[in-house]
Image (cartoon, helix red, strand yellow):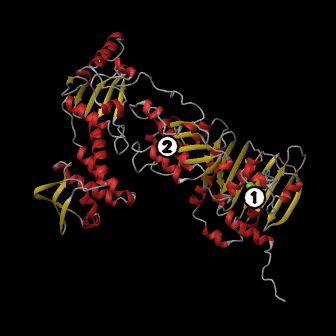
């Protein structure tokens, strides 16, 4: 007779094992309890935390509450009111359905619960310790449910010791709170830590909720995004590029009101922002996807935030184009071809509706180079293709623009009169369509004066040109007649030597003699008097630990081209024209490689307001 070696685990041990998966830290308890409150139809959910959850996690809701029987049952494993048949699994609207969270929490903490249903006179008070019910009494309490979780991991010292500092653990709690709050703008929430109010969120429209989570003054830097297709509908908000932050954190994806993380979709957003924010910054976004629940695999594991999408590639491309469109529509680019920006690379069969004319929310007559004649699409005046197709998608300015421009001024005496004196040009020339000043090129438009920053324009042009080359071959090097000598510290020398290959590729040919760098060749694009500062800034970049190693090449080319363009000036209108044409052949012609804008339009109305 052989003995069975398989034994059923005692219930409380099974619960502890389950708890290990579900409850990793105080924030996991917060998530489970808040989600239960929402599933119970709460309109107001209050979260009170003490000592980052190590001492107390309290969730108060005004939801449906539980009957005395359910109040006991809910702590049993696989006790759930949310799943009646296997089919329900595929139609889930609720957050939880495994009936595991409360059993898990009760096995590793001291839990007290007070709950009452709306139609019942009395409520139930339950206290559980180590899965044993210690108290079960009828009490007077308000409708809804109050959970108190104390001494988390009291019986799992390994877990308890594993908890991080208070600020880190509270950070996780705050993250969970924000995710739940962002998914439910129609519900009121509050968060207190050690008695201090962290959040007090009124119910309202989505924009209001996003703005209150993104923080002070964030409302005006939110750009709405919206797209509707057969497969996915997208809504939400983006932070304007100039509000991008150096820290990660304001990046939220939700699908069917559930927070998830997705580096692939994140990439789509980053790509749409490409060139508009510097590489050290992260775009902020809060994006809500709605898809058919049958087309996603919400990993049944409750703590995981990854989700598999059947149509992920399609969603990626929709995200990319709708973010681009949203940024374009709201005139994030100083000047912009609205038609080009709204051309989607989405297969038309996916679209629910026929594409509609984009709603332009800015002055629709705003187009710096639009001439009277060109509105029909034919320019016929021999201007560059670059400008027609790449940049504004319109013809170049013509003398008619000037006439038009000055005509407006005559009509309205309130409008600014731009003259040499008022702007104070030193070397102003007015030939054709540009006025030039060392640092700026000015081009009059119907609505005002387009100003282009020459250095930044040049930087963008050089960067675009060289980054393309750099990937395939070493950049051209200019040989010195006599080597330039530069003293370096030991650390700098080591840095230089450990990146020598990249620096050669960049066009530097150097030799090290103890503390001295002998520069035999330098990149052709770099004026000789900039070599020294360029090397200093390259070394500073190489030392910067924030720079991702995989990205070093980009940083170096950026730095090189920045140094190469920092003395750029334009002295003649013909030069201005060439500069602008080349600029508009660059994909990211609106922003310099550091994310700063290249162009700005001084509106006539703004000019007038100065007089
Ligand atoms: P799940 O959420 O997966 O169903 P839980 O262990 O989180 O499992 O909760 C078990 C059950 O307890 C729920 O299905 C629900 O019926 C009940 N419950 C939990 N929290 C609340 C609450 N705040 N209000 C009302 N009922 C609740
Ligand atoms: Mg639950």
Q: Earlier in the sequence, mark 2 or mark 1?
A: 1
Q: Is residue 427 above or below residue 231?
A: above
Q: Secondary structure at mark 2?
A: helix
Q: Position of residue 213 (x, y in %)?
A: 58, 44
- Asked whether the beta carbons under mark 2 and mark 1 sit within 8 Å of each other, the answer is no
Which quadrant of the structure image shows residue 257?
Answer: top right
Q: Position of residue 199 (x, y in %)?
A: 62, 45
Q: Quarter containing ligand 2?
A: bottom right
Out of 609 and 310, give the one closest to the viewer.
310
Image quadrant containing the N terminus = bottom right
Mark 2 C-beta closer than 8 Å to ligand 2 = no
Q: Is residue 193 visible?
A: no
Mark 1 C-beta closer than 8 Å to ligand 1 = yes
Binning the other alpha carbons within 10 Å of mark 2 as few (below 14), some (14 to 19) or many (20 upward) gives: many
Residue beneath disc 1: 98
Q: Position of residue 460 (x, y in %)?
A: 31, 42
């Amino acid at each position: 007779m052989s003995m069975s070696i398989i034994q059923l685990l005692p219930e409380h041990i099974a619960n502890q094992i389950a708890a290990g998966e579900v409850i990793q830290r105080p924030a996991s308890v917060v998530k489970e309890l808040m989600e239960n409150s929402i599933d119970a139809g709460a309109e107001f959910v209050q979260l009170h935390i003490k000592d980052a959850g190590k001492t107390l996690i309290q969730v108060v809701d005004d939801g449906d509450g539980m009957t005395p029987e359910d109040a006991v049952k809910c702590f049993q494993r696989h006790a759930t009111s949310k799943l009646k048949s296997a089919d329900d699994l595929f139609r889930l609207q609720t957050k939880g359905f495994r009936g595991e969270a409360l059993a898990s929490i009760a096995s590793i903490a001291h839990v007290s619960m007070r709950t009452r249903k709306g139609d019942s006179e009395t409520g139930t008070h339950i206290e559980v310790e180590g899965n044993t019910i210690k108290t079960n009494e009828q009490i007077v309490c308000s409708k809804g449910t109050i959970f108190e979780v104390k001494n988390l991991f009291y019986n799992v010292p390994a877990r308890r010791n594993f908890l991080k500092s208070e600020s880190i653990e509270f950070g996780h709690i705050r993250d969970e709170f924000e995710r739940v709050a962002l998914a439910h703008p129609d519900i009121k929430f509050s968060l207190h830590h050690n008695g201090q109010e962290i959040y007090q969120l009124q119910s309202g429209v989505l924009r209001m909720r996003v703005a209150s989570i993104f923080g002070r003054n964030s409302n005006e830097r939110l750009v709405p995004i919206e797209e509707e297709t057969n497969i996915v509908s997208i809504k939400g908000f983006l932070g304007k590029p100039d509000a991008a932050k150096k820290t990660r954190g304001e990046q939220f994806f939700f699908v069917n009101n559930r927070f998830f993380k997705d580096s692939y979709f994140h990439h789509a957003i980053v790509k749409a922002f490409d060139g508009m924010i510097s590489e050290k910054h992260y775009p902020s976004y809060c994006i809500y996807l709605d898809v058919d629940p049958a087309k996603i695999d919400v990993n049944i594991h409750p703590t995981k935030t990854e989700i598999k999408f059947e149509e992920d590639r399609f969603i990626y491309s929709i995200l990319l184009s709708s973010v681009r469109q949203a940024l374009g529509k709201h005139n994030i680019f100083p000047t912009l071809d609205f038609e080009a920006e709204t051309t989607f690379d989405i297969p038309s069969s996916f679209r629910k509706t026929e594409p509609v004319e984009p709603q332009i929310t800015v002055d629709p007559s705003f187009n710096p180079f639009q001439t009277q004649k060109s509105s029909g699409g034919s320019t016929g005046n021999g201007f560059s293709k670059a400008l027609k197709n790449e940049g504004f998608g319109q013809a170049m300015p013509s003398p008619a623009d000037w006439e038009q421009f000055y005509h407006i001024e005559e009509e309205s005496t309130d409008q600014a009169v731009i003259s040499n004196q008022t702007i104070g040009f030193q070397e102003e020339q007015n030939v054709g369509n540009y006025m030039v000043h060392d640092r700026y090129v000015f081009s009059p438009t119907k609505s005002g004066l387009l100003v282009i920053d020459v250095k930044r324009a040049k930087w963008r042009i050089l960067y675009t040109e060289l980054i393309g080359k750099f990937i395939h071959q070493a950049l051209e090097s200019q040989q010195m007649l006599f080597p330039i000598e530069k003293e370096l510290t030991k650390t700098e020398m080591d840095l230089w030597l450990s990146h020598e290959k990249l620096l050669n590729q960049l066009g530097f040919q150097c030799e090290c003699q103890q503390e001295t760098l002998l520069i035999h060749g330098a990149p052709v694009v770099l004026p000789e008097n900039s070599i020294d500062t360029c090397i200093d800034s390259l070394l500073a970049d190489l030392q910067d630990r924030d720079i991702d190693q995989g990205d070093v090449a980009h940083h170096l080319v950026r730095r090189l081209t920045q140094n190469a363009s920092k003395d750029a000036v334009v002295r003649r209108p013909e030069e201005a024209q060439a500069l602008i044409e080349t600029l508009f052949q660059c994909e990211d012609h609106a922003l310099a490689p550091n994310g700063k804008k290249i162009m700005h339009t001084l509106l006539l109305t703004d000019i007038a307001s100065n007089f």
